[in-house]
Image (spheres, rainbow, N blue to C red):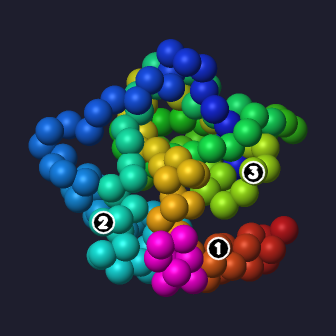
Amino acid sequence: MSQVGAGPAARAAIALPREMGRGGAELVPMLAGVPLFRNLSRRHLKRVASLARMRRFAAETPIVRAGDAGSAFYVLIDGGARVVTPKGRARKLGSGDFFGEMALLDDSPRSASVVAEGDVLTMTISRSAFGKLLRSEPALSQELLRTLAARLRSAEKTV
């Protein structure tokens, strides 16, 4: 699913808590559970975690909007959200779920909106920061291509 930018109030990034440590290394276990990153080495996961920013969204705030430019990938740290497609289909997301992974790789508009159902804390990774990482780590690019290809094959089977 693609992602869309939120309004200025909802977008306010918060600093990682001090207890998170330098570079967000405490995010590594969570990233390892995200299918897009599941097969990456610990070293690569640390590099990805170092790019992460935490963002809070208030209840009923759009996190991303269908049709907007996608510029970030999100992992729900705490709280729930609902995905709503332009055709009106809805799906629930909870802690550990992710969305917007395609925004890390292309400039396509978001394919659905995601709205916070209550107060939500997300981890975000911007496309520009992730692009720099991919250029400096070719092995990471190859692993992500394998992961995305597997997800595409799986999605084709369910259609």
Residue 107's tag is: 3
**Secondary structure beneath disc 3?**
loop
How far apart marks 1 and 3 lie (CA) works out to 16 Å
Residue at 63% over, 44% down: 71
Residue at 15% over, 49% down: 21
Amino acid type at image mark 3: Asp
Q: Is residue 21 above or below residue 132?
A: above
| Tag nearer the camera, 1 or 3 | 3
Residue at 47% over, 76% down: 137
Amino acid type at image mark 2: Lys
Residue 35's tag is: none
Q: On the picture, is 28 further left or further right than 146?
A: left
- Among the 4 quarters of the image, the one containing residue 4: top right
Residue 148's tag is: 1
**Secondary structure beneath disc 2?**
helix
Q: Is residue 137 magenta?
A: yes
Residue 84 appears in the picture as rendered: no
Q: Is residue 90 above or below residue 9?
A: below
Amino acid type at image mark 1: Leu
The residues colored magenta run: 135-143
- Tell me whether circle 1 and circle 3 mark residues in contact (CB < 8 Å): no
Indicate the position of residue 87 as horizontal and vertical percent values: 87, 38
Q: Where does label 2 land, which residue?
A: 46
Q: On the picture, is 102 further left or further right than 78?
A: right
Nearer the N terminus, badge 1 or badge 2? 2
Q: On the picture, is 115 further left or further right than 110?
A: left
